Amino acid sequence: MKKRLLQAHKQSPWRVQLQWIGLFLLAVLLVATITGLYLSVNGQAAAAGRSVQWLESDIEDTTNEISDLMTKLAKAQSSEKMAAQAEELGFHLLDPENAVYIVVPGFDPDSPVVLAPPRANTVINTPLIQDSYTSSLWDWFVTNIWRGSDTASGGGN
Amino acid sequence: MKPPFYMRYIILMVVCAILGVGIVFQMVRINYSSSAQELIDKSANYQGFEETIYPPRGTIYDRNGHVLATNQIAYEVGIDLKFVSDPESIAFSAASLLELDYADVFSQASTLQNGEDEYRYFVLASYVDEETVNELQALKESYSERRQEQGTSTPSLSGLVWTGMEQRSYPEGKLASNVLGFYNYFSRETAQGVYGIEETYNRLLTGQPESIFMPNDPYQVEALPDIDNGASLVLTIDRDIQAMIEKELADAIEWSGAEGGTIIVYDPENGDILGMASTPTFDPNEYWTYKETFPNPTPYNRAIGDAYEPGSVFKVITMAAALDAGVVEPSTTYEDTYGVYWVENTWPIYNWDGGAWGEQDMVGCMQHSLNVCLAHIAVDLLGEEEFYKYIQAFGFGRSTGIDLAGEANYPLRLPDNNQWVVVDLATNSFGQGIAVTPIQMVMAVGAIANDGQMMVPHLVRSVVDNGQQYDVASQVMGNPISAETAQTLTSMLTTTMEEEASQALVAGYSLAGKTGTAEIPTELGYTSTETNTSFVGWGPSDDPQFVVYVWLEKPSISKWGSEVAAPIFSDVVEKLVVLMKIPPDSVRVKSSAE
């Protein structure tokens, strides 16, 4: 005759069920939390992407507007308009015989227009977009936690 | 003992299991079905689109920073059929404001309502100006207010849309149009610079367009790559000098009855072109009309594209060669007894007036522009080898290398050409039988004004690219003559102008120069009634800061350069010295001494 060993004491079935339910709910909670985080970050990234699109469009519009305003300014200051305005105000081209000349030491009548700084040999090495904007959570974990702990433990050797 | 409703739980469990398995089965089936690839391919159309980004075209400035060519906003007006609700209003506004055909626009706007393809966009008009678009916007808003007041759905311009785009603009209109060229912007993909600076520096001005993929999914959006804008150019042209010489040229053509002309102002020290006027001109803002203004074979810029026989202005080059070769000095005399010079006893060369001028020194030969004297110098003193060596050293027979598209060059007929005859040597000495462009003459004469050093003429002073300004270095073409020869000849030609009481003189300024009256070759020989008149001069004589070249084609008022081109030179220089802030000689010399 086989002996059946029975536990003298065991948890009541409802307790066991509760524990399983609890574990299951914990897992669901964990998944839900990660899913929520993922959706939140992706949502923000998508919103940022949409902002980038709008900003790129704004940049183009602004660039066009700047060009347009430069053109309007150039038309308003055109040679023909300036000459007409000068004539209206009573000015006329100077007769060299009537000109009074004053010698100004160091004056260069033909100084070149400077629209931008002169050429310089500078190279910018700093990347514009930092790694923290492009690396994933896993990359961050590996770089800063995993490898960081290795460095900390082996650093003294 | 089984709990109550045990079977119901089991049935529910089985049903859920079946549903779950069914869902999984359907997902797998769809993914591997024959239509799956078709759906994937179709979805690719909605993922995004390829777009070519064109950087803004560079701006062109004059030497003082005034804008000569830039960009402005224009609009593409179109119909987005998805949003059209009132085709009649759209057709009406397009017909009245855009001057389009009502029936055509109505037909296009009604496409969706006729049940045709719903996802279509029609372009109604391109490069519509801002004023017209503002009128469309105002009309759209007034319709909207009316609909709100009346509670109706019409009238409505919904579906009529406009997008900003870049349009090339020349704020100064016709000014310097022969130098600038134009940009044929209508078709963005094939647009390019045509003629002038726009063509020569097209790649620099255009920048580097780039094709990129624009995703519809905002999660996949990345910042656009940095695309280099087109570089901007600072020209050597002075806007005020350019405006002045264009006006002088227009006035000159009107009073002289000339068919055309050109005026060039050039800095002999560095080769800068301060002004270059040519006829005809046109407004590059309406570039599509250029063929009406420049029917074939009219060159776009006569100053560089029109070769002609220069006449007596060329005597400056012959005399420079003779002085530099040491075959003559200013005091060397020539006996003009009969007013004719015989080339190998076969071909007669006559003076411009058919007369004889007796004994003349070299100053007299230039002052009275004696063809016989110069022919004698070229044939008897210099010889063909030396003469053509100097002609080529002065840059004739090849391009100057000026940075403008459309430069012409007429090859020299040299002694080794089997069509050359010795009389060519004689006639070339006074500028006949040889074809040059105005810019070639200016460059060559510039050597005489610059102590023998000949500078390559150029129009770009600086390039502004990526936020930095690069100055373009001047280039030396060569040293055809010595500094001493240049100064001697300048002194001679200053004397000739003063003693001749030339109409080219400007009070208070010492100038050197030479008139030119050239007969025009035709199929029947040279004309005697129609001529090309010219004048080339430089000053101040002791420190030349400009060379001015004036050329008028076939003036009707007089055929002589001394009567037509010389006074124009004087008018130009009188204004030029003010614009360049060059004091009279008395003031300048005094201030230098102090």
Image (tube, rainbow, N blue to C red):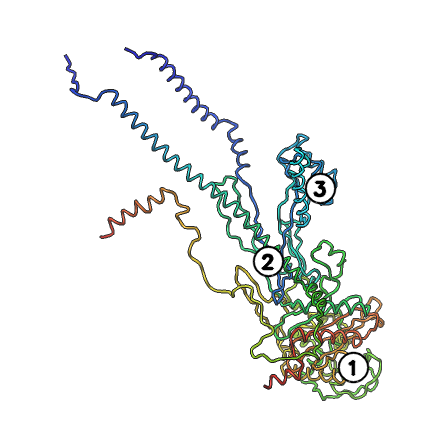
Asked if B186 appears above or below B423 in the picture, the reply is above
Instruction: Measure the C-alpha gap from mark 3 to mark 1.
Output: 72 Å
Question: Is label 1 or label 2 in front?
Answer: 2
Query: Where does label 1 land, which residue?
Result: B370
Query: How far across and how far down the image is residue B470, in percent?
Result: 54, 65
Disc 2 element: loop
The CA distance from mark 3 to mark 2 is 35 Å
Say which residue appears at 69% left-offset and 56% top-offset.
Answer: B285
CB under 8 Å between callouts 3 and 1? Answer: no
Quadrant position of residue B417:
bottom right
Q: Nearer the viewer, residue B167 or A71?
A: A71
**Residue B380 against residue B272 in the figure, above or below:** below
Question: Is circle 3 on the same chain as circle 1?
Answer: yes
Q: Kindly report which numbered mark, 3 or 2, lies closer to the viewer in this rendering.
A: 3
Query: Can residue B571 be seen at all in this image of the molecule?
Result: yes
Q: Which residue is mark 3?
A: B93
